[in-house]
Image (spheres, grey):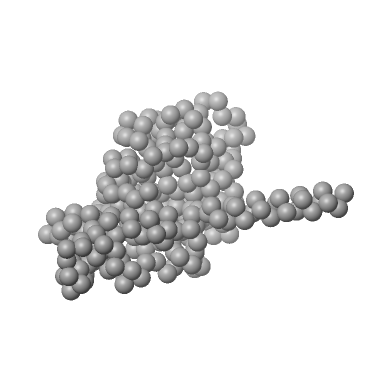
């Protein structure tokens, strides 16, 4: 009996360890680019893809994306969203050190001198401004095999939990909304869904506390998902959906197209 109990406890501990190891941490950088620098930004994206590809190969990051915004709170404020994926919160907060990124730039452009590499790197960084940065922890995601490749669509929905209903909102997303999105994925009307919480302490004046990421392979799938209505929902399920909607405020929705990706 004691041996069986010990095995059960060890099994639960191992499951928790694996779950912690699989948790994604992400940095979302909302990027502003001046109109006269949009062409230079193309070169910036290509350089960053080479740099982050090397960081991915060295297992410093889990992935990296650049998304071009189609709409948002004020399209003049941001034109791109850059997402970097990390395996733990420490790596997320430390990010990639500048000297490491310079070294990776040198690998990408071996024909340049050290001085030329540093100049190229600084010129690339000067192109973009990131006035908004979010540090997020993934809480839940759907079971799918969605492929990140240029051209796929994303809806980044910034949410703010109603004060005093933080737990209610998270429970609703995980227990009510996740199965709905999973059903859409199973029917081919969506590619992927994930639910994230801010990884940093926030005060009551925070503009958002959570983020949902909704991915689609193309516009046809996106619009089919918007028109979808589950007519088989019971009255109890509809009540749970309405309660979940009332536990949060949907602040902004950013629709974006994936342009560069490292996986």
Vertical comparison of 187 with 107: above or below: above
Residue 225 makes an appearance in the image? yes
Residue found at x 29% / y 68%: 103
Give the camera-side residue of 105 and 185: 105
Query: Residue at the top extreme?
Result: 232
Residue found at x 20% / y 68%: 117
Residue 123 makes an appearance in the image? no
Vertical comparison of 114 with 251: above or below: below
Residue found at x 55% / y 37%: 179
Give the camera-side residue of 109 and 9: 109
Q: Position of residue 185 (x, y in %)?
A: 46, 33
Q: Position of residue 132 (x, y in %)?
A: 34, 63
Give the camera-side residue of 186 and 160: 186
Residue found at x 37% / y 63%: 133
Query: Residue at the left extreme?
Result: 36
Vertical comparison of 228 with 60: above or below: above
Q: How many marks?
A: 0
Query: Residue at the right extreme?
Result: 1
């Amino acid at each position: 009996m004691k041996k069986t109990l010990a095995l059960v406890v060890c099994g639960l501990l191992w499951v928790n360890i694996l779950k912690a190891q699989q948790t994604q941490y992400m940095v979302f950088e909302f990027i502003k680019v001046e109109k006269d620098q949009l062409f230079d930004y193309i070169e910036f994206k290509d350089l960053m893809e080479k740099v982050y590809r090397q960081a991915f190969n060295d297992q410093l990051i889990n992935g990296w994306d650049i998304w071009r915004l189609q709409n948002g709170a004020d399209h003049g404020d941001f034109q791109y969203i850059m997402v970097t994926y990390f395996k733990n919160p420490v790596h997320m907060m430390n990010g990639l050190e500048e000297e490491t990124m310079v070294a990776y730039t040198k690998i990408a452009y071996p024909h340049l001198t050290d001085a030329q590499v540093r100049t190229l790197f600084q010129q690339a960084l000067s192109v973009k401004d990131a006035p908004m940065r979010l540090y997020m922890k993934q809480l839940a995601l759907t079971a799918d095999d969605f492929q990140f490749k240029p051209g796929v669509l994303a809806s980044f929905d910034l949410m703010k939990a109603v004060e005093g209903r933080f737990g209610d909102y998270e429970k609703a997303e995980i227990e009510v909304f996740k199965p709905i999105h999973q059903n859409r994925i199973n029917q081919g009307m969506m590619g992927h869904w994930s639910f994230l919480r801010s990884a940093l302490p926030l005060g009551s004046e925070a503009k958002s506390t959570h983020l949902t990421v909704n991915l689609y392979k193309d516009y046809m799938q996106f619009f089919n998902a918007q028109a979808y209505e589950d007519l088989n929902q019971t009255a109890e399920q509809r009540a749970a959906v309405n309660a979940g909607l009332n536990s949060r405020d949907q602040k902004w929705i950013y629709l974006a197209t994936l342009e560069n990706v490292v996986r």
